[in-house]
Image (cartoon, rainbow, N blue to C red):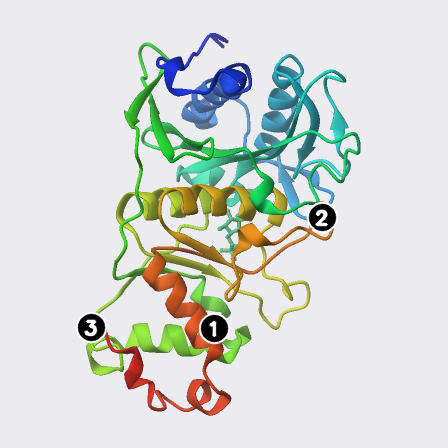
């Protein structure tokens, strides 16, 4: 492991974040090498246990968590909250940041050579470890993700737009690729795990029914569906060419609030998407106006091109007879 990956354009990073972002980049560059070795290296996708929330843990989940917590000790991070750990950990008592992390997102894709990622979120540290994270998502001072795919990239916001860096494979530096990422306002793509259709609420079914009906339905246009099962990869696609992602609440036990975690996944993705001009809600209300009730709490999540996210919210406002009848008179939703 080289251990020396640096962002090549530190002038694009506010001074107080240079150390923590450089630390994250060092680990991400090393992880990207480990992932690229695949089965030539250690067994990354082997099941090793369960995390605090009962999710299966893979070897790479644990390896990534250990690597990030070890490096972030020297990067002004006081409180470290990881999806892989039950409790908040104190890294540096004099640190000023509280950092939440999903060290390895999309772990079901580790063994099949499909893009996976790391998601992080930064707040000003309070004295209280838990309260440093159970606060409005709009309190975040930075958020970002690394994607490990055909390219390894960092997409990050410090509250003034979104920056995109690509890891140069030879120099192992993250080079600025786009200083102003914008989510396209309109798109005809949607992403949802459609195998859960029978468990969804009527408004979500109605929205998807109308997309599937295409030019023969009330929307009078064709749509395209994608589902990668890596939140980071779906986010990266939406950052690049727009669209909408939905992981709604559903009727299965344990899915009352969907699947995704507020602190480690939805809050940081919502900040990034809003900073790039898109929208992010729980189906109805903005994620940035909400706080997690507990460290590992889940929330329904809808994000992407603003027009689409607003449309999903509008379906939730329709009267019962409109969302339950096949198309009802949803002609008002044309286009
Ligand atoms: O972290 C949870 C996660 O793996 C996300 O990366 C992804 O969007 C989702 O779960 C996949 O859910 P499902 O297993 O329902 O396809
Ligand atoms: Mn995840």
Q: Nearer the viewer, residue 277 or 331?
A: 277
Judged from the image, the secondary structure of the residue bearing numbered disc 3 is loop
Judged from the image, the secondary structure of the residue bearing numbered disc 1 is helix
| Residue corresponding to mark 2 | 53
Cβ of mark 1 under 8 Å from ligand 1: the answer is no
Tell me the quarter of the image containing the C terminus.
Answer: bottom left
Q: Nearer the viewer, residue 282 or 117?
A: 282
Residue 162, picture quadrant:
top left
Q: Tell me residue 246's x, y (percent).
A: 45, 60
The earlier-in-sequence mark between 2 and 3 is 2
| Residue corresponding to mark 1 | 197
Residue 287, picture quadrant:
bottom right
Q: Residue at x 51, y 45 (%)?
A: 108
Query: Within 10 Å of the Cα at label 1, are there few (<14), some (14-19), or many (20+) other Cα atoms?
Result: some
Cβ of mark 2 under 8 Å from ligand 1: the answer is no
Residue 118 appears in the rendering = yes
Q: Tell me residue 243's x, y (percent).
A: 32, 56
| Residue corresponding to mark 3 | 221
Residue 26 appears in the rendering = no
Q: Residue at x 41, y 91 (%)?
A: 325
Instruction: Please state which of the two labelled residues, at mark 2 or mark 3, is closer to the viewer.
Output: 3
Q: Are marks 2 and 1 in contact (CB under 8 Å)?
A: no
Query: Within 10 Å of the Cα at label 2, are there few (<14), some (14-19), or many (20+) other Cα atoms?
Result: few
């Amino acid at each position: 492991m080289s251990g020396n990956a640096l962002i090549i354009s530190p002038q694009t990073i506010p001074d107080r974040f240079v150390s923590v972002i450089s630390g994250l980049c060092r680990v991400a560059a090393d992880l990207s090498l480990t992932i690229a070795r695949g089965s030539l290296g250690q067994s990354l996708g082997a099941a090793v246990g369960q995390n605090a929330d009962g999710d299966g843990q893979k070897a790479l989940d644990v390896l990534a968590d250990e690597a990030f917590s070890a490096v972030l000790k020297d990067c002004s991070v006081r409180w470290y909250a990881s999806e892989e750990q039950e409790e908040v950990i104190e890294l540096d008592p004099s640190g000023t940041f509280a950092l939440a992390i999903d060290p390895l997102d999309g772990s079901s894709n580790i063994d099949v050579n499909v893009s996976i990622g790391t998601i992080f979120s930064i707040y000003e540290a309070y004295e209280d470890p838990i309260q440093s994270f159970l606060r409005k998502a709009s309190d975040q001072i930075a958020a970002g993700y690394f994607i490990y795919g055909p390219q390894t990239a960092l997409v990050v916001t410090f509250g003034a737009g979104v920056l995109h860096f690509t890891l140069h494979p030879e120099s192992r530096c993250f080079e600025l690729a786009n200083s102003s990422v914008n989510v396209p306002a309109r798109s005809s793509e949607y992403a949802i795990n459609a195998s859960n259709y029978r468990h969804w609420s009527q408004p979500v079914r109605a929205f998807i029914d109308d997309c599937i009906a295409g030019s023969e339905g009330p929307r009078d246009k064709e749509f395209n569906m994608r589902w990668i099962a890596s939140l980071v990869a779906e986010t990266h696609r939406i950052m690049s060419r727009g669209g909408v992602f939905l992981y709604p609440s559903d009727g299965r036990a344990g899915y009352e609030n969907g699947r995704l975690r507020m602190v480690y996944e939805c809050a940081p993705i919502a900040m990034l998407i809003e900073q790039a001009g898109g929208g992010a809600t729980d189906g109805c209300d903005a994620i940035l106006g909400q706080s997690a009730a507990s460290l590992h709490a889940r929330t329904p999540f809808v994000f992407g091109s603003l027009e689409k996210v607003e449309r999903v919210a509008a379906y939730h406002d329709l009267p019962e007879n409109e969302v339950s009848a096949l198309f009802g008179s949803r002609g008002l939703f044309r286009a």
